[in-house]
Amino acid sequence: MIQRIQTVYYGLAVLMLAIPLMGMNLVSFSTASWSQEITFFGNKDIQAAMDSDLAPLPNLPLFWLNVVLIILLLLIIASYKNLKRQQSLGRITFWATGITILVLGFAIFNFMNFTRVLKPEMHIGVGFYMVIAAFILVFLGNQGVKNDRKLLDSLNRLR
């Protein structure tokens, strides 16, 4: 199981998705009087603005989306004997990770428009890059499963 390259890719993808759950920020917005970080657990006001008419940024359920992705990846690793199931779960995880990245990008764009009155500076955190790295690792793992299935199909033809 561990000697197969796709298991290594999927394991690294699990790590890339689990590390931001330790509180790493995905994106932070800041001005001179206001600062806010977005993590998988929600939004954190670092420094509140003096204006009382500013509404806080809306929270997204990113934590549960990340946990579902980790569970799917662990199911893929556990189904190493059934390549067909592993390939189908890999596709589902690939698309779910892509949707997660799109949700994060859409949320960043909307938060930037939501706070455009303040003209904040946006800083993309390490957690966002880790989600993108997990997306790439899931793709590489899917390629490994596809290569294994192709190899086994060619061996079956020789029999």
Image (tube, rainbow, N blue to C red):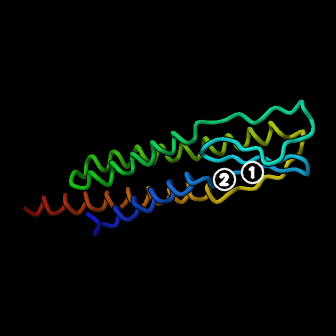
Quadrant hosting residue 151: bottom left
How many numbered badges does the structure rendering display?
Answer: 2
Instruction: Give the answer, above or below, for where 34 lies relative to 61.
Output: below
Q: Considering depth in this image, is 156 or 9 the residue closer to the camera?
A: 9
Q: Residues within 10 Å of mark 1 (few under 14, many from 20)?
A: many
Q: Quadrant for the N terminus, please.
A: bottom left
Percent across and percent down for residue 104 are 63, 44
Q: Would residue 135 be seen by someone viewing this image from the given angle?
A: no
Which element is circle 1 on? strand
Residue shown at the point (89%, 30%) measured from the top left: 53
Quadrant hosting residue 145: bottom left
Q: How crowded is mark 2: few (under 14 residues within 10 Å), some or many (20 or more)?
A: many
Percent across and percent down for residue 127 are 61, 56
Q: Mark 2 sits on what residue?
A: 25
Q: Are marks 1 and 2 in contact (CB under 8 Å)?
A: yes
Residue shown at the point (32%, 55%) measured from the top left: 77
